[in-house]
Every structure is written in C-alpha cells, then in structure tokens.
C-alpha cells in the first residue's frame, strides 16, 4: 500500500538505515520542508520504502524533485522503490532527481528518467538552508546531473 506519511518514526527508521543520518537531522528536515510530501510503501502496516517529493521547477516547467529514495535492507530488490516512482509519476506528473552515483544513473534511466539537465536548471521552492544542506548533497558524481522523466 502506498500512502503519504508524516510518521517521523517510520521515516527515520528507513532513512536512518539507508543513509546513516541521525533522528534529529531527519526530523529537522521533515519539520522544515514546506513544499514536500513523503510518499511511503507499507506492507501489512510496516514501512518498507519511501521517497520525498519536493516542489520545484526545471527550466520553465513545474514538477516534483524526488529526494531520499530509500528502502529498508530486508525489503531490497522487491520493487518497492520502483512502485513508489511509478505511483509518483501517475499522481504528480513531471519528476526529476539527482542520482548519487553511476549505478543510480542506470537504475533511474531504466525507470524512464532519460532527460539530462544541469544543476543550475532547477529551482526549489524551499529555503536556501534546506536546499544547500539537504537537497543538493550526497551526490558522488564528479559532475552532478539532474535526470527527468519529462523533456523541458
């Protein structure tokens, strides 16, 4: 079952395991993000996977920035993150993201994120602090790119 969640304990369980961030950092992000939703995949009331959808514009087109895609280790390779992405495309329209590494570029391209843009093409409808301390960090690529499922 896919639903929007605000349960910080569920969010921090998945995010913390995936990225190693503290509960306080995750809660700070969740408390201060203004224009976002946390979309989660639940199996029998247990959270398995999540992602945030953050309002943004890419070029002249408004859409959603996909952030913090993660799945608990015990649920990896079951397709839950892919289901979340497909649901987000159907329900929210144009999506974009910054893949953290080369492996994730391939992962997202196989899921329809085929258009490439530069970082200066995106504008977040959030504070500079959240943008700089959260939304634009974590990329290991020498030259970070934005992938989108829509041509702008």
Image (spheres, rainbow, N blue to C red):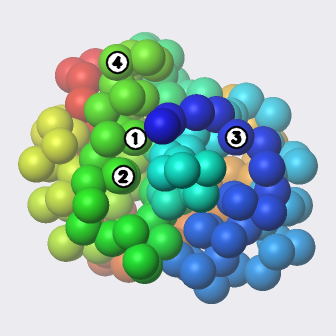
Q: Is 52 placed above or below 60 here?
A: below
Closer to the camera in the image, 65 or 128: 65
Image quadrant holding the C terminus, namely top left
Residue 96: x and y, percent?
38, 37
Marks 2/1 in contact by CB < 8 Å: the verdict is: yes
Q: Quadrant of residue 89?
A: top left
Label 4's element? Answer: helix
At a point 14% along the width and 48% down the height, the residue shown is: 109
Residue 24: x and y, percent?
88, 73
- Residue 84, numbered circle: 1
Label located before the other in sequence (2 or 3): 3
Label located before the other in sequence (4 or 1): 1
At a point 34% along the width and 18% down the height, the residue shown is: 90
Marks 4/1 in contact by CB < 8 Å: the verdict is: no
Q: Is 105 placed above or below 62 here?
A: below
At a point 50% along the width and 29% down the height, the residue shown is: 64
Give the alpha-carbon distance from disc 4 to disc 1, as whole Å. Answer: 10 Å
Label located before the other in sequence (4 or 2): 2
- Residue 81, numbered circle: 2
The residue singled out by tag 3 in the image is: 5
How crowded pointer 1 is (Cα within 10 Å; few <14, some 14-19, many 20+) is rated as many
Say whether residue 101 is left or right of residue 119: left
Give the label, 4 or 3, closer to the camera. Answer: 3
């Amino acid at each position: 079952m896919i639903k929007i969640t605000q349960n910080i304990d569920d969010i921090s369980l998945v995010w913390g395991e995936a990225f190693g961030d503290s509960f306080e950092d995750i809660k700070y992000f969740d408390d201060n993000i203004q224009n976002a939703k946390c979309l989660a995949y639940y199996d029998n009331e247990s959270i398995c996977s999540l992602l945030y959808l953050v309002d943004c514009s890419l070029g002249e087109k408004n859409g959603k920035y996909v952030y913090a895609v993660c799945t608990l280790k015990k649920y990896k390779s079951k397709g839950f993150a892919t289901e979340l992405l497909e649901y987000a495309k159907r329900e929210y329209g144009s999506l974009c993201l910054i893949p953290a590494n080369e492996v994730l570029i391939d992962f997202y391209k196989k899921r329809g994120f085929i258009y490439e843009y530069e970082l200066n093409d995106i504008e977040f409808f959030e504070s500079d602090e959240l943008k700089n301390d959260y939304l634009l960090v974590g990329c290991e690529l020498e030259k970070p790119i934005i992938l989108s499922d829509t041509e702008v």
